[in-house]
Structure formats: structure tokens, C-alpha cells
Image (cartoon, helix red, strand yellow):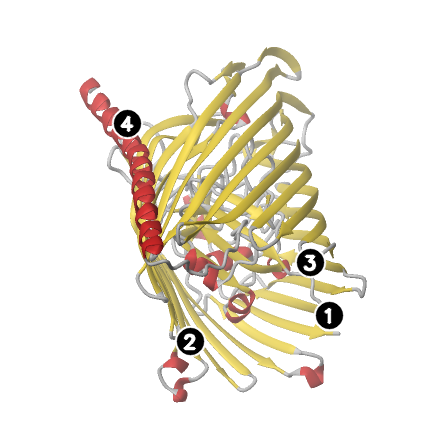
Amino acid sequence: MISSRLHLQDRRLFKAKQLSIAIGLSMSCLTYAQAEELTEATSNNVLPTIKLEAQGNWLEDANAEKVQKHAGARTIINRNRLDEVAATSIKDALKQVPCVQVQENNGTGGSDVSLNIGVRGLASRLSPRSTVLLDGVPLSFAPYGQPQLSLAPVSLDNIESVDVVRGAGSVRFGPQNVGGIINFATRAIPQEFAANVSLTTEYASGTDQVKYSPNLFVGGTLDNGLGLALLYSGTKGDGYREANNKTDIDDVMLKTAYQITDADAIALNLHHYEGYGEMPEGLTAEKYAQNPYQSNKSRNYFSGRRSDVSFRYTHQDEKNNFELLTYYIDSFRTSDLETDVSATTSRMDTSPRDYKVFAIEPRWSRAYQLGNSNSEFTIGYRYLDEDSSEFSGRSSTYALNAPVTEIKARTTSEGGTKAHAIYADNRFDLGNWVITPGLRFESIETHNNFTAYNQGVAVNTVSPKIDSDEFLPSLSVMYKATDNWNIFANAGVSFGPQQYNQLARLEGGVAQSTTDGLHPEKSNNYEIGTKYLGNGLNAELTAFYLDFKKELILERDAQNNGIWKDLGATSHKGVELGLAYDFAYLTDALEGLKLYSNYTFTKAVAEAGDFEDKDLPFYSRHTANVGLGYKVNQWSVNADMFAQSKQHSPGSGDTYQTDESADGKLGDIPGYSTFAVRTAYDFGEQFHGLKIAGGVKNVFDKQYFTRSTDSTGGKYVGQPRTFYLQTSFDF
């Protein structure tokens, strides 16, 4: 056993050394290639004309051409695509991206307020392992100490594009980016005045529930160069469960921008989000068999708000690209969760929490000529300061449907993080080769003062601290085979520092530090792939491998306390395929016909422990999405299919459970496929841009479910056949 562990450690050390050696060799080869090219140019007395341009922040103004030049797996879904497919939520939109898996429900985060996405087989519960951004600003409560999206302050109707970077992004953006970077870009300020109002109405069959999503956009640029835009999006009404699933969301943003000179610009964004979502409970196997849409709890809800302000200064000339981004985030969340203690009694848990985040991020890119090649050097820095205040309270037991008894403190937590990060990378263009070595250094200081209570009376306090100093190297290589086709490979190290609730826990009614038992997550990430863009075809094929030294997993004890455990070494490997084709390039007779699809194979397994070689929880080995769209004159029609293979909820301990447990929390989850259709008509400018669209999700009313091991875990039925109507009007 000891020898196998040593072997595992040696193997991983060897891989880390391989990455360092690869970076060193690339620099050596690079120097030789550049010297050779310079000698050749000098001997011929020819100095080639090279246009220098610093790209800078490659997340800005992302499009298909930028994605093609990125030396890693990356997919962007623009506004046109979002309008064409049957997407009425962020979750629907993300299903269009290879290797992104969306969990509709995890118990305490199952409403429209939350977001549960997993990338490449990583845990999807509240999206903790992907860096999720809104216009470059983190969406999580606290990027280091609480990187979760139980409150996801982003609305689809405010979004211009969804940009998912699955590889070669760890140096620029960190931490918690093992699952890549997801950036939601909001609608830009138009040069001319523009205004639009829209409404989406959804009707869930079977339960006769209705939900509304209104949207407003007003913006333009004044003669003095000041640009203004107001974005509002909301979600109101009920989901598809019979009771306790009302949603009330308001999301408003004021965007301002001013072009100081031809090279200098400033932008200020003010954003406020409030969300309230009732949460029907998970069902036991027996109750699910009786009626999967029922809900017998009326007190479970999640609510929160977020206010943030961001300021950006940019300078861009032919050779330089400088950006200074600073932001402040103030967020609050709370929840009431009622659980059954016995057949006749219940209890209530409540968890109000406050978070504050301040950050400043300067970054400078410089384009320069080395020999006869273009190069770009980028250096950046981030200082981030976050504070958290968390409370957990629980009532004594009370009779079913009786008034809730007094809630008393169980735990309190006062945490904080100060983090410094500096990074640098250099893009070398050597003929058809593009080589980009990079390095990020993270210095993180995290603390948490955690107090346990007994019936509201303090028992003890622990004050764990952890300091992390991590070097995160990366190397990407791309070969431009033709103007349309390239091949890429990259390697990098990703790091996930411990969260506040991973530093201490309640055990036996006493606060205990976990810094000696848990460790930060670290992964070596590799991928190789190819991309093609041209002649109506947009295609990508990528093979990936994530090698976790340590991965953490959240489990529940008998008292429903969240217990983080060290899962140990895991591996995530697979293949991603994305394809889009415009048939108009084939023949004029097929103009307006488009195909888009993606497929992902993922194998994520434990490499050690009781569940060695077993699948990790809550991911599918196979996922696929296929869509066909046709547009003729003012009509457009789309049909979509989504499918995923089975998942596992095995529990913990010595037994990997595949059979369904009585409470519905454990056991295999069958795969399923659903179909959606949409048709739309554009009345044109003579009717002020009036557009009307109607569609059906889950056309054949396929009944499927997921499970949850959360506080209100059990079986959760999936979305039934749902009809929706979309209207949009320009004014």
C-alpha cells in the first residue's frame, strides 16, 4: 500500500517536472528559431514589414476569429445563437457548450437563483471549480473563500455572449479555474440610440404553472462621447413543481463609457441583483412514485442580493494595451431549510451570510518585434481582499406543520482572505508556430474564526489559518496549418485554495480545525486538439486530461452537517467535439439551413481509496447536443436534441451504492434525452422590429430525475413538457 502511494507520488512529481522541462525546452528552441530567422533576414538584406498589435485582454470582444486563434479548447455562444435555439435560461445556453454539464437541481440550489455547472467531470454543485465572470468581474460570493453560485447574479436576456475557455487560461485568471473560465459578456452600449423590450412566458404542462421573464434595454452614445445603457431582466412566477417553487428575480445594470482620446477610454458599471426562490424538497422513493411533482414543504426558500461597482481604464495604441480594472462587491444570502427529523417532527435550519470583496487588477501588454516575428509580452497583477460573516442556526424539533420554534445559533464564522497574484506570459509568433509560456504566482492568506454553540451558548472557538504560495506554470503551442486550420497543445497547473468552510467544522457539538486533515486542491491539466473555421464550417476536437493530486468532496453526516473530505487522487480524461455548419456554402438551394452539435466523452474516476477506478458522483460519461435551424424570409425554425448518459450518487463509506436508497438520495441516475422545437417570425423594421417566437421544451414529455445528497436531498423530477412564447419590440 505504501509503495503504491510512493509510486503515485513519483509519477505526479515526474509530470510536474515534465511541464517545467517543456517550458525550458520551448524557450531554448524559441531562442534558436528566432536567431535563425534573424540571420536569414539579415543575409538577404530584407527587413520584412510587420504590423505590431497588442491583443491584451483576450476575453474582451470575443468572437469566432479570436476563439480560432486561442491555443486551447474554447467555445463562444453569441446572441444570434442564443436567439435561435430553445434557450430561455443560462442553464439552457450552457448546454450548447462541449464538456459543460448542467445539474438542474441539487436540493439547496435548485431554483433559478442558483447555477450548477460542472466542466470535464468536475463537481457541478454550485459551480465551485470554474472561474465564472460577468464582464470580467467574478460572480461568486468570494473568489477565494466562497467560490460558489448558490446565488448566480446573471440573467440571460442581459447577455450578449457566453465565452467558455476550457484550456490555456490558468495563468491569466485564477484561482479555482480547474474547470476553466466562463465569461458572460453583457450587451454593449450602442453608438446610436437603441431600445428594446421583451417578454418570455413559460407554461409547464401537468402542473399548469406560469413563469414570466421581462427584459428592457435602453442605450446610446451622446454627441460628447458619453455612452449610457440601462439593462433590466427579471424572472417572476412558478416553476414546474406543484407547490413552493415561486421565483422572484430582479437584475439591473447601468453601464457607462467615455472615450477620452483615440487611445484612452474609461467605463463604469453599476450592478444590482436580488433573487428569491422557493425550494421544494427532494422526495423519498415512495413519495416520488406517488407523485414526482408534489411538494409537502412550504417554508424552504433561498434569497440573496448583490451590489457591485466596477471601473475600467484602458489605453490601447499600436504596440501597447494597458487595462486597470477595479471592483467592489457586497453580497448577502440566506435560506430557511426545513427537514423531517421523524415521521411526526421537523426542524428548521437558517444560514444568513455576508461577503465583501475588493480587488484591483492592472495589466499591461506590449507588442514587439523579435527578428522577423511578432511577439507580445503581458504582465499583470491582482490584489484581492475579501471578508465573510456566516451564521448557522437551528430550531429545536416541532410537530409537523406547527409554528417554528426559536432558532438558536449553532455556529458562527468570521473569515477573510488577502491575496496577491502576479503573472506573466509571452506569445511568440514564429512563422506558423505560436508558442506561449507563462507563469502565475499566487500568495494567499486565509483565516477563519469559527465558533460552536450549544442552544445559543458559545462552546469553543478555533481560529485556523492557512498560507499558500503557489507557482502555476503553463505552456501552450499552436501550429497554423492553414489560414483556416490549426493544431494546439497546452499544459498548465491549476490551484484551488481552501474555502472558509473547509478550514473548520462542527464535530460532536465542538468546533474543530480541519487544516491538518484537508489540503488545497491542485491539478495538472493537459489538452491537445485542433480547430477549423472557414467555408461555412466551425469545428473543434480536443482530448483532455486533468490529473488531480488531491480532490475534495462534500458529504453529509447524520446531523446533515456538511463534511468536507479528502477524496485523494482523481483523473478526468476525455474527448470533446463541437461542430457547426452553414449549408449555404454547399449549395444555394440550402441557404438558411444550419447544423450545430457537440459531443463529449468524459471518464472521471478516483485513483485511490475505497472507490478506486469508480466513477465520481454526478457526471455523465456521454453528453450530446444536436440542433438544426432553417431560416427563410422572415421565418425561422429550430429543432434541438439533448442527451446525457447515466450518473451516479454512490454515497460514502465502504459501499459504492448503485441501488436506490429509500430516501432517494443514493443510487444510479438513468440517462435521458429531450427534444425541443422553436419557430419565430420577424415582422421587420416597419413594425419597429417586432419579433414573435413560440416553442416547446421536452416535446415528448420525457420524465427524468436527478438526486441530491444535500440537506433537503432526495429525488428531483426534471422539467416536463413546457410551452413558451417570446415577444420582442424595438422603440
Which label's residue is closer to the chain start, 1 or 3?
1
**Helix, strand or loop at disc 2?**
strand
**Helix, strand or loop at disc 3?**
loop
- Disc 2 marks a residue whose amino acid type is Lys
Residue 192 badge: 1
Looking at the rendering, in which quadrant would you find the C terminus?
bottom right
Which label's residue is closer to the chain start, 2 or 4?
4
Viewer-nearest of labels 4 and 3? 3
Viewer-nearest of labels 3 and 2? 3
Residue 262 badge: 3
**Residue 326: x %, y % from top left:** 66, 40
Viewer-nearest of labels 2 and 4? 4
- Disc 4 marks a residue whose amino acid type is Leu
The answer to which quarter of the image holds residue 41 is bottom left
> Which of these two is toward me, 646 or 597?
597
- In the displayed structure, 336 sits above or below 66; it is above
**Residue 333: x %, y % from top left:** 65, 37
- Disc 1 marks a residue whose amino acid type is Glu
**Helix, strand or loop at disc 1?**
loop
> Which of these two is toward me, 571 or 59?
59
Residue 494 appears in view: yes
Q: CA distance from mark 4 to mark 3?
A: 50 Å
Q: CA distance from mark 3 to mark 2?
A: 39 Å
Question: Which residue, as the protein is rendered here, is positioned at the far bottom?
Answer: 589
- What residue is pinned by disc 2? 594
In this rendering, would 191 be left or right of 525?
A: right
Q: CA distance from mark 1 to mark 3?
A: 19 Å
Residue drawn at 58 percent across, 56 percent down = 239
Q: CA distance from mark 1 to mark 2?
A: 31 Å
Q: CA distance from mark 2 to mark 4?
A: 47 Å
Which label's residue is closer to the chain start, 1 or 4?
4
